[in-house]
Image: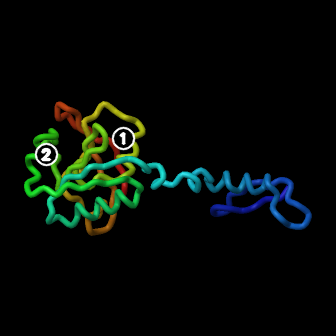
Amino acid sequence: MRHVAIRGGSLITAAATRRDGAVSRRALIAALAAFGAGTLVRSPARAADGVSVDVWKSPYCGCCGGWIDYMRAKGYRVNVTAVEDMDPVKIRFGVPADLTSCHTAKIGDYLIEGHVPEPAIAKLLAERPALRGLALPGMPEGSPGMDGPPGVYAVVGFDGAGRTSIFLRTGA
């Protein structure tokens, strides 16, 4: 047996290395498993392939464009509608007033209000909770599309009655 040191000194056992020094299939499989080969096959962008996002935003807001670019880079198909006055959009969709931000998006039956990081959206779509949507109220510095150092954000889930709770604490 041969030991191969990886990740800061942790060990995996690579059995059956060939005499000529080439790595055996068994050793290769063990190494791929240790490094999380599944993440090589299924990237975050691939997980979002085919998911359509409809966004309503002011034609004058650059940070909304930053969030749209971020979502496209994650593999979402984003359709944009420029709207002079966003208030009627938020009222029509039922976004609670204390959760509003600069843009509103819709993914299927869910609303996404503001600069919500994609990990929260991926969780929402995977778990399908009984929520109306997610929000990242205001325009937090460093959130997707916003300038500044990235941070950890409390993404709020809200239901049709306007009740809220922290859905996920996540970075961008």
Q: Nearer the viewer, mark 2 or mark 1?
A: 2
Crowding at label 1, few (<14), some or many (≥20) Cα neighbours within 10 Å? Answer: some
Residue 34 in view, yes or no: yes
Quadrant of the image for the C terminus? bottom left
- Return the mark for residue 138: none
Q: Residue at x 83, y 65 (%)?
A: 22
Q: Secondary structure at mark 1?
A: helix
Label 1 amino acid?
Answer: Leu
Picture quadrant where residue 81 is located: bottom left
Residue extending farthest to the right is 19
Mark count: 2
Provide residue 130's location: percent of width, then percent of height: 30, 30
Pointer 1 residue: 124
Judging depth in this view, the residue of 34 and 89 nearest the camera is 89
- Return the mark for residue 90: 2
Q: Is residue 122 left or right of residue 160?
A: right
Q: Residue at x 41, y 55 (%)?
A: 75
The earlier-in-sequence mark between 2 and 1 is 2
